[in-house]
Image (tube, coloured by chain):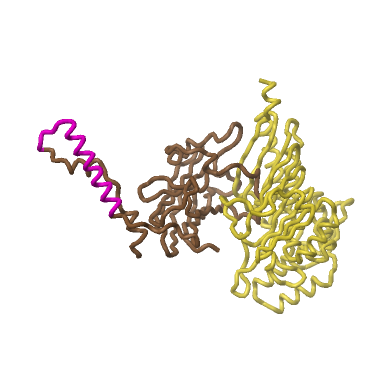
Chain colours: A brown, B yellow
Amino acid sequence: MERSGVASAQVEFPTTNDIMSHIDSNQPLGRRDLLARMAGAVLAITGLAAFKRPAAPKWDDRFELAVDLEIATPGGGRYHRPYVAVWVEDATGKPVRTLSLWVNTSGKGPRYIRELRKWFAVDRDVEAANGPDLVATVSSATRLPGRYSVSWNGRDDRGGVVEQGSYRVVIEAAREHGTYQVMKQDMALVAKPVAADIAGNEEIARARVEYRLRK
Amino acid sequence: MRLLRTRRPYVHSVHYDHVLGTSLDLRIVATTPSVAARAEALLLAEVDRLELILSGWSDSSEFARWQTTHAVDVAVSPELAEVLDMCESWRQRTVGSFDSAAQAVIQALATDDQIRVSDVLSTLARNEPRWVVDRANGTARRLTELAVSLDAIAKGFIVSSAARCARSVEGVRGVLLNIGGDVQHLGEGDVDVGVSDPFAPMDNAPPLVVVRIRNAAVATSGSYRRGFVANGHSVSHIVDPRSGIPSHRIASASVIAPDCATADALSTAFSVMAPHESVAFANSSPDIGCMLIEDDGTITTNASWSDRALRPRR
C-alpha cells in the first residue's frame, strides 16, 4: 500500500491524556503556571502533528465511490422503504458528506429523522443533505426491486475537495415499529480501485462499497 | 382551522419497494390526510388488481392463463382486452418497432441458437396479427405461437389506471405516481419531472434534464439498469424485433404523452428506432414529446419535448 494518503489519516489528534502527560504532576504548580504549561504542551503537540503530517494529495477526480444497497424484504411483496441515511466520515469519525437521506416527507416535512439517531446526532439539516428539491420525481429505466445506488465525488457537505485517505462509509437504516441498523465500511481512497461487500441485516439485505474509476 | 386547510392542502408522500418488481413513489395533494390515505389505498388496490390480470411474472395471472390458449376465442377481462388491443395497435403504427413478440426473440437469443433466432425473426417479419381482440364481445384469440410479453406497456397502463383511481377520490387535487421510472401526473398544478442521466443513474445524482408537465406522463426506457446475457455478452433487454439486435445506439429514450401506457410503449419503440425516425413519429401527434440519448451522449429532442424542458442540459 502506498504511504501517501493513508499515513495522514492515521495521525491522531492529541487527547487530554496526551496533554496531561506533558505536565509533571509531582511539582506543585500555580494556576497561571499550569495554564502556561498546558498551552505550551498543546502547541507542541499540534505543531508536531502538523509537521508530521505529509501534505495528502487531493481527491483524484478520475475516481468515484459508489455505494449500492438492497432493501431487505421479509416475506416479499409491497414494502415501505425504511428510513435510510448514507454518509461518509473521515478517519477521525467526523462526518464529511451526506450522500442520501430517505425519510418520510408527508405533511409538514420529514417527521422521522430522529429515528436515524446516528445521522441526526450531529446537527445537520435535511435541505443541505439532499440538496434543494429540484424535481418532484424522476423518470428512468426500470429500477431493479429494492436496489439503490449513490455515489460520492470526493466533495464535502460544503462543496470542498477532500484529501485522499481513509474514510468510513456509514449506512443507517431504521423503521417505525421495526429494527434499527448501522453498517460501516472503512476504505482507503487513494490511487487504486478497491471494493468491499458489507454483510446484510434485517433492513438492508446487502451493500457494496466500490471505489472505482468513473465511467 | 377549516380556512387553513383550504389554503394549504396536505401533501402525502410515500415510497414502497417491490411493487410490480420495482419501486413505487407516490405524492398525493389532498384536502386532508384521511382523504390522501383513502386515495392511496384505492390506488394500491388497483395496482394489485391489474397485476393479477396483466403480470407476465406469475403463472396465475389472467394473461399467463390466456397465453396457454391458441386459435380459440377466450373470454377476457376488459383490461386485458384493452392492453392486447393497444399492443397490436402500436405494433402496426410503429411498423414492428414495438412488438409484444420481441419476447420470443429475447428467449431465442438467450439460447445462443442462431437458427432459432432466424426462425423467430422470419416469423415476425411475416407481419401477421399476433391476436384478434373483440372488445364488444369481450374475447381475445391468440394467433401467434411465439412467446409474448406485455411488459413494455403493462406497467404504464397500470400507472395511468391507478393514478386515475386516486384522482377520482373527492378532495384529491393532484396525484403524481412513479412506478420504477414510469410517471403519471393527474390534477392541478405543474410538476417538475427529472430524467436520469443514463451514464450516471445514481439515486443521489442530479437529473440530466427536467421537464415541467401537467396531466401528462413521462416514461423512460434504457438498458443501464438491466439486461441479459447472449453469446457470453451482457446485452440490453430491449431487442429490435425487426432485426433481433439488442438496443445499442440509444442509451435512454424518454417520452411525454397524455397517458403512461402510450409513453411506456413509445419509449420502448424509440429505443430501437433511429432518433430521426422517433422524432418524426412523435411529431405525428401534437402531444407526444421525446428525448433520445445516444451512447456517445448526443441528445435529440422534438419541439414538444423542448417546450417543456426547463434545462436542456447540465
Is residue B108 magenta-colored? Answer: no
Is residue A39 magenta-colored? Answer: yes
Q: Is residue B130 above or below residue B157?
A: below
| Residue A92 spot, x, y in % from top left | 35, 48
| Residue B137 spot, x, y in % from top left | 88, 51
| Residue B56 spot, x, y in % from top left | 70, 57
Which quadrant: the N terminus of chain B? top right
Tell me: B255 left or right of A100. Answer: right
Tell me: A66 left or right of B6. Answer: left
Tell me: B223 left or right of A38. Answer: right
Residue A127 visible (yes or no): yes
Which quadrant: the C terminus of chain B? bottom right
Q: Looking at the picture, tell me which residue is in the foreground, B197 or B173.
A: B197
The residue sitting at 10% across, 36% down in the picture is A27
Q: What residue span does the magenta drawing correspond to?
A: A26-51
Q: Is residue B101 above or below residue A43?
A: below
The residue sitting at 55% across, 36% down in the picture is A110
Tell me: A102 left or right of B90. Answer: left
**Residue B199 occupies quadrant:** bottom right
The residue sitting at 78% across, 51% down in the picture is B257
**Residue B109 occupies quadrant:** bottom right
| Residue B220 spot, x, y in % from top left | 70, 55
